[in-house]
Every structure is written in structure tokens, then in C-alpha cells.
Amino acid sequence: MVSPIFEAVDISKRFGPVRALDSVSIAIGAGELHSIIGENGAGKSTLMNIFCGRLRPDTGEIRIDGQPVHLSSPKQANAAGIAIAPQEINLVPELSVAENIMLGAHLGGRAVIDWKATRIEAVRHLHEVDDQIDPAARVGSLSKAQQQLVQIARAAATDARILILDEPTATLTHRETEKLFEYIRSFKARGHSIFYISHRLDEVKMLSERITALRDGALAGTLDPVTATREEMVTLMAGRPPGAARKPRRDVSADAPLVLEVEGLSRPGEFDDLRFDLRRGEILGVSGLIGSGRTEMAKCIFGLTKAASGEIRYMGKPVRFRSPIEAIQAGLIYLPEERKQEGIFPLLSIVENAALPSMARFRGALKMRNREMLDEVKDSLAALKTKFGSASDAITTLSGGNQQKVIIARWLMRGAKVLIMDEPTRGIDVNAKYEIQAVLRRLTEEQGLSIIMISSEMEEVLDVADRILVMHEGRGRGIVQARAETQESLLRLAMT
């Protein structure tokens, strides 16, 4: 890089007593993809929000083409050629895809919008990112993956020359991911630049010209992707080698009692003739490509949808949960994939999020036994090694990994016997992922909890599960012992 087109120099930011960024300096050149990696809470989002005008730094300077600039709003950042496609969906669900892409950027005069030209421009940007999304479709009818692609097209429609992509492939299929990578290469070929944030380190290594790691709000170091290894990246982020605290798995006894049995479960268009069982203290991984019916199966067992045929036996007795309330009362819990939309209550505190399903236990004659409730929440969170300031803080102040621990604590307090966890570590950094995995192993080994873990990451399923159910196009392709399989063997099963 001869001369940077964008520089952030000695950027610092505090939120009250919390230091989010400490003298961070980062630059990017024309046509460069610069990846920013780090654990949740490392300061990545704060830094990117400063870059796109959502936050202002306490100290430091931003320069574009060598000149100092003050980006006090997203509108100013857009005018300076900077746009972000955030990880969280931020679209208007009732508007069409084309209207969302060109929102605030309509073509025409001040008084009259040229709708035809606006739609043509929207379609052009959309098709650069993905040409299989209907521009006339209502955004609320799209899948999460399609909405993510629309967000990227919307950011590109600002004519940005610096694009910030935050976990862009977290929900994408293989085809959508490859299409996005094509767009990234095309964007760079035009001399434009990308700040790329992802926990998928293989992607980071493949796409980047440079990799910068943040740790605890400070610059941890910069790596050359040509020579950097995954282990070096994780060590730089976490300050210690990956998996340093991981323990070997133990074998689940073949005599352990069955807690869940599924026989011939079918729901037309989603899954067909599924058969598996789950033992006390076991983690059953569910692997398969996106669209294989994994989530649909979980929601059906939980009572969110109804099966057309088949039988479910829970604790040895036939059941057919008519609603999630019945499943929860029986101790069978489903933790959804969309943690921020469906898992947490963002306006409530940490203690309220953890205790909400158990409130009835803390009712006194005249008032709530708040001290008792707070003590139990703190004990539960401490047992899961949750990192938080005050239990009265909003849950949104926590990192993704610690939010997930609060959700787990919520259901352990409610007496959960079986957890069905859908992508439990999605959007969580590598070190926090290992912590969550260790928590799951400990809960099964020490408390006899049984877990069905759905994950798109085959490496995670192999690391954590005792057995693995492999699904393809709604059907089970086999149940295998995790220790005897490889990613390649699982992929072969998942694609046959």
C-alpha cells in the first residue's frame, strides 16, 4: 500500500468506565480488503460504527485521502464514500427489495421521484450481489440470508468506495457465498476497498490483503494472510493458543436412559421419516447443509409446528406438544438460531432476561423476592462463567457469547432437561465459541442435561457431539459416532 485512502489514527472511545477502544490506528488502501478480527467485545463494532458516522471518537482523527474529516452522522459518511452492511438486519419489511435498496437515494428531482430510473438502478445493484432475488418482493417475505444480501446491495447503492461488511456470510448458503465473493472481487477490481469483519477465519485468510486483530479494545497485531495460520490468528485474538482449556470428551454409557425418541416423524415439504434418539447426558449433533430441514425438525419437536405423521416419545412416554408452552413445562426447550431477534429481550436487564420464565417462583405474599431472584441468577451465571458488570445492566451490553450464556441460564433455572440448540455459536468469536462448547460438555457430564445441537460448522459438530445425525433434503442420512468421522465423511453423507 503506497498511500492509504482512509486512515484512523489513535482512535479511543469510552462508554462510562468501560474502555471500548484504546489508541487504535488502522488504514486501508485502494483496492484492498482489510479484515478486522477479534473476540466479541474486542472493539470491532465500535470502531466500524465510528468509521460509518454512527459514533464519534473521544480522541483521534480520521483522514480520507490524507485530509482530516469529521463524520458525525451516517449521512456524512455516505457522502464521504463510506457505507456499512451491518450484521443485524436493518431493513423496512413492508417495502419492496428495490425500495429498500434505494431508500434515501431515489433518482429524480426534489419534487418528483423518477420511479422507473430508481427501480432500474436498484436492480443493477441487486444483481451485482445476487441475481436470484425478486426486486419486487416484499422484504419481510425473504429469508434472513436474502435480507442480508439486500443489505449489502443497499450499502453498495450509496456509490461507496469503502464498504464495511460485518459477518456477511453468517446466514448464506454456499451458492450465495460464492456469488458474494464474486461481487467482492469485482468491487475491489474497480479500485474500491473493503473492511471485512468475520469469525470465519478461512474466509478471512482467503479474501484479505491484510488481517488486523483487536483485543480488549487495543490493536493486538497485523498479519499477512499468505503466511498466517488459523492458530496464529486465534492466538492473536485471544492472547493464548486455541483450545488451550479444552478437555477430552467422555463416552456416554450405552445404558444411559433414553430421554427423547423420534420415530418416522414427517412434515410435507420440510422433512420426512426422521428417526433418532437421545440419551441422558448426551450431545446429539445435527449436521447438514442449509435447507436440509434441521431447524424445521427442531421447531416441530418443540410444538411450534405440527407433524403430519410419526411419533415422539419423551421420558419414555408418547407426546405431541401442541404448543411451546407444553414443551417448556415438560422441560424440553428450543433455543432459536436468531438469538438477537428471538432469544433475548433487548429492553430488559440481564437478571430479567435470565429469570423471566421463573418469575412465579419468586413471588411473595405482597411483593417479589427480588434479592433471592438476583442471587439465584448470579449463581447461575457464575456457574456458566458469564462475564458481566452489573446484573441490572441491559442484556445488549453483553457480547454474543455472554448473551447466549444468559439464555442457557434462563432455562437451567426453569428446570430444563433437554435443550435443542440451533446454531448456538453463530456470530460468536472463536474463543467465546470454545467457552460455550465447554459449558455444554460440562452441563451434560455434571448435570445430566441432554442436548441436540444443530450446527452448520462440521468442525464444531465433530468437536462437541457424541453422535451426529446427518440430514439431507429433509431426510436422515445416518447417525454416526463423532470420534470416528471427519469433515469430509460428514460432507459426503450430507450431499448424498
Image: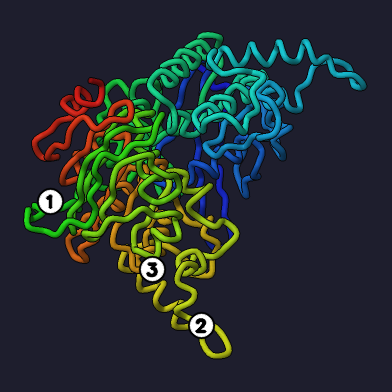
Residue 249 circle label:
1
Look at label 3 and name its amino acid: Arg
Q: Upstream in the sequence, badge 1 or badge 3?
A: 1
Q: Secondary structure at mark 2?
A: loop
Q: Nearer the viewer, residue 472 or 108?
A: 472
Residue 363 circle label:
2
Left or right relative to 358: residue 258: left
Q: Secondary structure at mark 1?
A: loop
Q: Say above or below: 295 vs 103.
A: below
Residue 265 lies in quadrant:
top left
Question: What is the CA distance from the residue labelled 1 to the residue labelled 3?
Answer: 27 Å
Residue 138 lies in quadrant:
top right
In x, y percent, where is residue 381?
37, 67
Q: Nearer the viewer, mark 2 or mark 1?
A: 2
Q: Secondary structure at mark 3?
A: loop
Look at label 1 and name its amino acid: Arg
Q: Is residue 66 visible?
A: no
